[in-house]
């Protein structure tokens, strides 16, 4: 394999090879003279040998730095370079602290990778996780080296009036030549990946709060001047986060000042730098005119996520990057719980859970079954940035959730308390976390089976659980037989059984009621039971079951597994109508829809079945839509068809065009068969009051939006002009972005001619709103392909004056929407989609490897594709792989795809 010179060497890093650092850094005193073309960085550290490690040289990481001076205890010293590593051998003997001073310069304006110190819109920002600090100064760039930081920033005052870093501002003032300075001291020790600085023309929304303990804190949200009116929701979300972490986990804010800063050039969502979170504008800025309900919800959860990292990530951090899920899985779990706890009613909680599971199943399950499959705690990597994955984050969160399920909510809180009591201020491992939860709950199933439970950390792949029920009407017993298995993944041929918590209940097939569950020999009469699977095969028997039951298994999606159960259509209809568990009610509907899709896909290959859905299912869907009991948000989820990606995952051989055609036929059928119901749904879910992005009103808007898109679709088929006209009117009159964008999507998605007009109007109305322009590009990249017009349109849009490839949000909005999220348009028989993909991966890799490597993942599942797609996709991968100067990031992704 060939890897690009320069950056980091293309070595495989192995978890087993972990060695404690040879030197510890106690203090770091950084001085920056900020200049876009040449920033000077003076780094004065105190270090000492780690007494637990055999003496050796000091190795400091650095990348793209110009080294000017190295002093040890104030005097010059010899050093050598080993690739990018600065090696110091002649250091003072013994374990006494010594001073090391390093002076370097770097070029922020040329930094297009957005890792390290860079310039965006004339302001300075940093991004250090995972290994960006080495692009700022020479340092042992690893999370288990924790130090106290003092930072002095100097810059031109007119250009950079605001100078921020972690912790507390202890001094500031004027300098000569129109420059000024600010000095910051972080009271907490931290790993260098949590270092941050910001300098620029920014303004802040401020809020003073008093915590439970009576302490005062200052919260600030910094943005560009024109964006201040879009910061209220982010600030409210931050206040809610502070209150929630105190109430639910007893974790207070440990800083006098907590800052969020927004930037429009950012590789991911946000970053939890200590006391100075840096955010993608997408997860800060919102107004009812520019942001959708989904944007408001995402802001709430990302603000929460970064804030919660302050304890789970910052106070207790990772020993090494293999432990990434220690902070990410746990913090995703916490932000999911936060969003659920903010929901007023149980139905909204269930909706949130369904949305989270949908992400897991459409993104993580494919990852677990593809060439990039890796355990929640990986064993090796080449480029750590490739492992900020849905497996580490979302599956990691499910692993934490299972622990909570096994020890109970109170038990989990006790476990968290013990985790902090033991490890506050340390860099630890996933084992340490699991041990604390288990030790705080010694009588739990988790403690009893901890070793086996931890296979969730070490074994990749999605387990399958097969369930079969046997009812004995004479004995009135019902036995459920379970078996579990897990397919091989790259590097892991054989898997041992997992510990799988299966929450279940029984629904009477005739009565539709929840049946009391008597376990053999026990007198409990609950209607829900938690069965813990740990063997390859296991059974459970319930007694006193008076009628044939339908099993409701894996309630609330109690484990991240694929459940195979031979339900009849009637049984699924019973669950859809009666299951007390909202998640499984939704799941039953999805199974029915999926089943119809798969059957149609397998049918006559020469024609697309006009009506893949049978009458019973259509009637059931009508029943859900018209139900007076169910919430609008839940209805919208039930009536949303499984995605093309999710359907593809169920098939051995994937013909993306066939899947697309069948799914479109299903959409049309729902549109036409339920036309009157959609008309009713649209009219009945109007919100006339003031805009509020709460779950109930968002749900109504979502259902009304869905109704519009079905009505426009039906209209294009029937030639009706009333609904497209109404939709255009709504598009024009809407008083919020959700309704406006839903109307736009309905017109564009149905292929109606009015869509073009609306798109043009939308652009001119929002041409000064970056985040709205992203939506405009994304809509067009994700458009339903009718006759192959999407790719030429995407190529055309790349020439649009508002398209900027170097801005990650903009690149994602157009290119990712097409390559990663529009399978029906991307997988073309003429391979032109893949050619486009290869060109973009190579282009972007030249300036931003992290973003390029994400795009490279679009062809992960090429081996499952039917011909001619499969060969064409392989060719495109080979084309990228054969470039000699690829980044390690892209190289690792494409080579894994080709070799797995
Ligand atoms: N910890 C950061 C992600 C950093 C990604 C580096 N490639 C954001 C988060 O998970 O909260
Ligand atoms: Zn995170």
Image (cartoon, grey):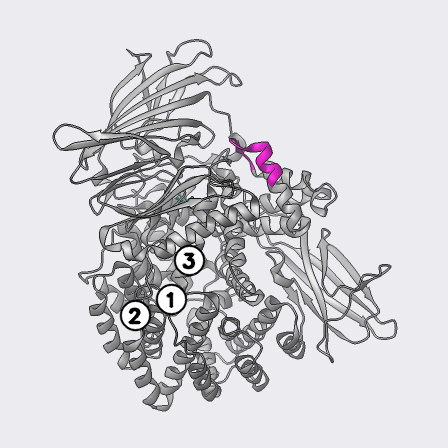
Q: Residue at x 28, y 64 (%)?
A: 777
Asked if 310 appears above or below 595 in the picture, the reply is above
- The verdict on residue 420 being magenta is yes
Residue at point 33% right, 65% down?
Answer: 288
- Of labels 1 and 3, earlier in sequence is 3
- Density class for disc 3 (Cα within 10 Å; few <14, some 14-19, many ≥20) is some
Give the magenta-colored segment's residue range.
Answer: 417-429
* Quadrant of the image where one finds ligand 1: top left
Q: Which residue is located at x 59 percent, y 56 percent?
A: 560
Front-most of residues 689 and 345: 689
- At which x and y percent is residue 556? 61, 62
Q: How many marks?
A: 3
Q: Is residue 329 left or right of residue 845?
A: right
Say which element carries label 2: helix
Return the mark for residue 298. 3
470 is within the stretch colored magenta = no
Vertical position of residue 406 compared to residue 591: above or below:
above
509 up-or-down from 144: above or below? below
The answer to which of 405 and 823 lies nearer the viewer is 405
Mark 2 or mark 3, earlier in chain: 3
Q: Nearer the viewer, mark 2 or mark 3?
A: 3
- Front position in the image: 491 or 589: 589
The residue at which mark 2 appears reads as 790
Foreground disc of the pair 1, 3: 3
Q: Quadrant of the N terminus?
A: top left
Earlier sequence position, callout 1 versus callout 2? 2
Q: Which residue is mark 1?
A: 822
Label 1: which secondary element: loop
Provide residue 466's location: percent of width, then percent of height: 68, 62
Can residue 39 be seen at all in this image of the molecule?
no
Above or below, 502 relative to 16: below
């Amino acid at each position: 394999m060939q890897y690009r010179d320069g950056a980091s060497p293309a070595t495989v890093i192995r978890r087993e090879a972990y060695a404690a650092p040879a030197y510890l850094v106690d203090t770091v005193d950084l001085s920056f003279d900020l200049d876009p073309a040449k920033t000077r960085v003076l780094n004065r550290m105190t270090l000492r040998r780690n007494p637990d490690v055999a003496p050796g040289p000091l190795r400091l990481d650095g990348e793209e730095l110009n080294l000017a001076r190295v002093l040890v205890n104030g005097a010059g010293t010899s050093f050598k370079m080993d690739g990018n590593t600065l090696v110091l051998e002649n250091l003072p003997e013994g374990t006494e602290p010594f001073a090391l001073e390093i002076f370097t310069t770097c070029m922020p304006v040329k930094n297009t990778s957005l890792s390290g110190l860079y310039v965006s819109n004339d302001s300075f920002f940093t991004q250090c996780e995972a290994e960006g600090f080495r692009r700022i100064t020479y340092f042992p760039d690893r999370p288990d080296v924790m130090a106290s930081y003092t930072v002095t920033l100097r810059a031109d005052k007119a250009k950079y009036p605001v100078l921020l870093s972690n912790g507390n501002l202890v001094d500031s003032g004027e300098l000569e030549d129109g420059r000024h300075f600010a000095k910051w001291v972080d009271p907490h020790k931290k790993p260098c990946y949590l270092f941050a600085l910001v300098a620029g023309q920014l303004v802040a929304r401020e809020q003073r709060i008093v915590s439970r303990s009576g302490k005062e804190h200052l919260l600030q949200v910094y943005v560009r001047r024109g964006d201040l009116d879009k910061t209220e929701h982010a600030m409210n979300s931050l206040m809610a986060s502070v209150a929630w972490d105190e109430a639910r986990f007893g974790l207070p804010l440990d800083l006098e000042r907590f800052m969020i800063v927004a930037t429009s050039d950012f590789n991911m969502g946000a970053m939890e730098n200590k006391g100075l979170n840096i955010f993608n504008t997408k997860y800060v800025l919102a107004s009812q005119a520019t942001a959708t309900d989904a944007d408001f919800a995402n802001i709430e959860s990302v603000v929460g996520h970064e804030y919660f990292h302050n304890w789970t990530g910052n106070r207790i951090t990772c020993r090494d990057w293999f432990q990434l899920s220690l902070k990410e899985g746990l913090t995703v779990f916490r932000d999911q719980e936060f969003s659920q706890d903010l929901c007023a009613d149980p139905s909204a909680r269930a909706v949130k859970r369904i949305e989270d599971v949908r992400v897991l199943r459409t993104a993580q399950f494919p990852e677990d079954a593809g060439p990039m499959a890796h355990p929640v705690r990986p064993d090796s990597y080449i480029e750590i940035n490739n492992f900020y994955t849905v497996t580490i984050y979302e599956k990691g969160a499910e692993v934490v959730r299972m622990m909570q399920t096994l020890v109970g909510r109170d038990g989990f809180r006790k476990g968290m308390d013990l985790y902090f009591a033991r490890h506050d201020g340390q860099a630890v491992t996933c084992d340490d976390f699991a041990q604390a939860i288990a030790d705080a709950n010694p009588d739990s199933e988790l403690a009893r089976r901890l070793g086996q439970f931890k296979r969730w950390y070490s074994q990749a792949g999605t387990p399958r659980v097969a369930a079969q029920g046997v009812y004995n009407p004479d004995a009135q017993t019902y036995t459920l037989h379970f078996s579990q298995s897990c397919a091989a993944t790259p590097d892991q041929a054989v898997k041992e059984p997992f510990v799988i918590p299966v929450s279940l209940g029984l629904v009477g097939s005739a009565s539709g009621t929840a049946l009391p569950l008597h376990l053999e020999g026990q007198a409990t009469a609950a209607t829900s039971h938690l069965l813990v699977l740990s063997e390859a095969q296991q059974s459970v028997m319930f007694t006193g079951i008076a009628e044939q039951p339908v099993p409701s298994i894996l309630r609330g999606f109690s484990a991240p597994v694929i459940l195979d159960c031979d339900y009849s259509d009637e049984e699924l209809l019973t669950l859809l109508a009666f299951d007390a568990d909202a998640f499984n009610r939704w799941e039953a509907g999805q199974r029915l829809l999926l089943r119809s899709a798969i059957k149609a896909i397998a049918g006559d290959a020469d024609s697309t079945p006009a009506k893949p859905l049978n009458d019973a299912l259509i009637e059931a869907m009508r029943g859900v839509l018209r139900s007076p009991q169910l919430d609008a948000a839940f209805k919208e989820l039930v009536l949303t068809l499984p995605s093309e990606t999710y359907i593809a995952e169920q098939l051995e051989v994937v013909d993306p065009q066939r899947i697309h055609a069948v799914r479109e036929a299903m959409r049309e059928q729902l549109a036409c068969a339920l036309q009157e119901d959609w008309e009713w749904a649209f009219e009945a879910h109007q919100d006339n009051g003031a805009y509020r992005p709460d779950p109930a009103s968002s749900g109504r808007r979502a259902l009304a939006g869905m109704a519009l898109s079905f009505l426009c679709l039906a209209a294009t088929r029937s030639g009706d002009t009333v609904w497209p006209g109404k939709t255009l009117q709504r598009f024009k009159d809407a008083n919020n972005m959700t309704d406006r964008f839903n109307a736009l999507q309905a017109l564009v998605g149905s292929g109606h001619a009015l869509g073009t007009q609306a798109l043009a109007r939308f652009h001119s109305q929002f041409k000064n709103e970056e985040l709205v322009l992203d939506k405009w590009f994304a809509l067009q990249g994700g458009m339903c392909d009718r006759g192959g017009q999407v790719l030429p349109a995407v190529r055309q849009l790349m020439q649009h004056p508002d398209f900027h490839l170097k801005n990650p949000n903009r690149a994602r909005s157009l290119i990712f929407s097409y390559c990663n999220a529009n399978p029906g348009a991307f997988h073309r028989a003429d391979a032109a989609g893949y050619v486009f993909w290869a060109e973009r991966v190579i282009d972007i890799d030249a300036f931003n490897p992290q973003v390029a490597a994400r795009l490279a993942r679009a062809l992960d599942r090429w081996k499952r594709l039917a011909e001619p797609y499969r060969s064409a996709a392989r060719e495109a991968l080979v084309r990228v792989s054969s470039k000699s100067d690829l980044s390690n990031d892209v190289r690792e992704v494409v080579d894994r795809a080709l070799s797995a």
